[in-house]
Image: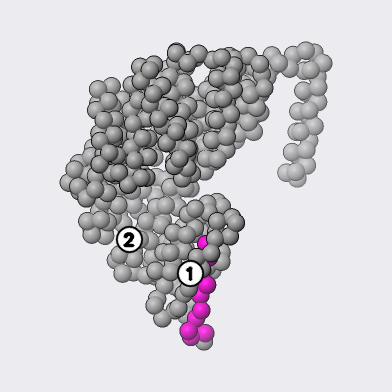
């Protein structure tokens, strides 16, 4: 029934387009459709950070085919105005790309629309047609926001070299046009690049510079984000007292904003800090508190990481049964999402969590698609232990 209905709507849509072309109105209607799409996405975006976030994300997902059609038209329409409207639409959908695990698609749309926008001669010395800066936007200038947003999508996919180039470009552009908000976010991203290279002192310096900018601007979102990043870096440096102070302030800002995802993420980082300090019950409680918030936001990627972190905590608490359950759940979700980069860490956890009387050999062979697998051999094949299957892995309960 669903395929039949889809075919029916496709026929109706094609007939409608034929009639619009025959009447010479297709271009006018498509431009109006692009404007409507950008307006809808921009109106939904601010609320995504709050309690209605899941409903608004679902609304955007329901219109995704509409948005794709509008973005495609923005790439082909010859006018610079509509190229810029297409860029506004892609940027307004940034949280959908991020929270609904569509990072690669978001990156493609964003890079294509930004390139077309520049080719059409859109101005680079003015903020563009944004009537107001949306909550959570990574700047005040449209091109700066675009570059910073591309970096976020790169980081989410582990594309470090690409993130380095776009971060530097964003910082130069932000400073040249006087976009202080965009400068703060670019500094956060450059700090992330330095962290990937192991230069934690430089990371902390860049993130603390972003905190100073955020405080001077009284920008809640930038304040939350920069404080959170400094807290993460101070945790990695072993400066736990300062990390705790930064993260507690970050959590307070997120809660005052009603920023559900920000609250969840800061709770997770506080949990990692507690784990480093050996406070295992506290770590499990904090990360466990983040899970329902992430579920409300419909963020599968961060949920998978949180489950993996709970597995690490269970291992540290010498509870291999609970660890295996958490790692297996994270593995199942990662495989369902085809998140190949996440699979090895789950397999490592499963190997570490299994009782030692089972001999496991990890096959460190990468197939062309990047999968890692494990071989296991039971010493006692007649055991009455119960086993649960999770994809290609089996764990003892």
Closer to us: 383 or 173: 173
**On the picture, is 84 further left or further right than 210?**
right
**Residue at (44% x, 13% y) in the render:** 125
Badge 2 element: helix
Q: Earlier in the sequence, mark 2 or mark 1?
A: 2
Tell me the residue that label 1 is attached to.
362
Closer to us: 266 or 59: 266
**Residue at (39% x, 16% y) in the render:** 177
Q: Is residue 321 visible?
A: yes
Relative to residue 356, is residue 138 depicted above or below?
A: above
The magenta-colored residue range is: 372-381
Tell me the residue that label 2 is attached to.
313
Image quarter in which the N terminus is found:
top right
Cβ–Cβ under 8 Å for marks 2 and 1:
no
**Residue at (38% x, 66% y) in the render:** 322
Image coords of residue 231 (percent x, y):
26, 42
């Amino acid at each position: 029934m669903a395929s039949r209905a889809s075919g029916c709507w496709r026929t109706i849509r094609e007939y409608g387009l034929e009639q619009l072309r025959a009447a010479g109105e297709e271009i006018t209607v498509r431009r109006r459709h692009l404007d409507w799409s950008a307006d809808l996405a921009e109106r939904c975006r601010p609320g995504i950070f709050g309690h209605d976030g899941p409903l608004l994300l679902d609304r955007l997902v329901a219109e995704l085919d509409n948005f794709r059609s509008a973005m495609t038209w923005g790439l082909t329409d010859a006018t610079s105005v509509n190229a810029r409207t297409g860029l506004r639409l892609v940027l307004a959908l940034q949280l959908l790309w991020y929270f609904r695990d569509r990072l690669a698609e978001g990156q493609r749309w964003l890079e294509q629309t930004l390139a077309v926008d520049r080719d059409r001669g859109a101005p680079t010395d003015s903020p563009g047609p944004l009537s107001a800066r949306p909550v959570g936007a990574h700047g005040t200038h449209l091109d700066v926001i675009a570059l910073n947003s591309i970096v976020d999508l790169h980081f989410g996919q582990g594309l470090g070299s690409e993130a380095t180039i776009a971060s530097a470009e964003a910082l130069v552009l932000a400073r040249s046009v006087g976009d202080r908000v965009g400068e703060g976010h670019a500094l956060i991203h450059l700090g992330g690049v330095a962290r990937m290279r192991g230069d934690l002192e430089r990371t902390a310096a860049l993130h603390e510079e972003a905190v100073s900018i955020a405080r001077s601007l009284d920008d809640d979102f930038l304040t939350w984000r920069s404080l959170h990043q400094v807290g993460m870096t101070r945790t990695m440096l072993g400066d736990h007292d300062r990390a705790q102070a930064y993260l507690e302030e970050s959590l307070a800002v997120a809660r005052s904003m009603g920023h559900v995802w920000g609250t969840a993420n800061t709770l997770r980082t506080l949990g990692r800090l507690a784990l480093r300090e050996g406070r295992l019950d506290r770590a499990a409680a904090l990360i466990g508190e983040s899970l329902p918030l992430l579920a409300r936001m419909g963020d599968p990627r961060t949920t998978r990481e949180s489950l993996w972190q709970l597995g690490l905590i269970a291992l540290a608490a010498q509870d291999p049964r609970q660890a295996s359950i958490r790692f297996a759940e994270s593995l199942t979700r990662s495989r369902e999402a085809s998140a190949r980069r996440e699979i090895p860490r789950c397999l490592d956890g499963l190997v570490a969590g299994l009782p030692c009387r089972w001999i496991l050999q990890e096959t460190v062979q990468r197939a062309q698609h990047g999968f890692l697998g494990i071989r296991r051999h039971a010493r006692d094949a007649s055991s009455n232990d119960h086993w649960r299957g999770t994809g290609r892995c089996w764990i003892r309960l």
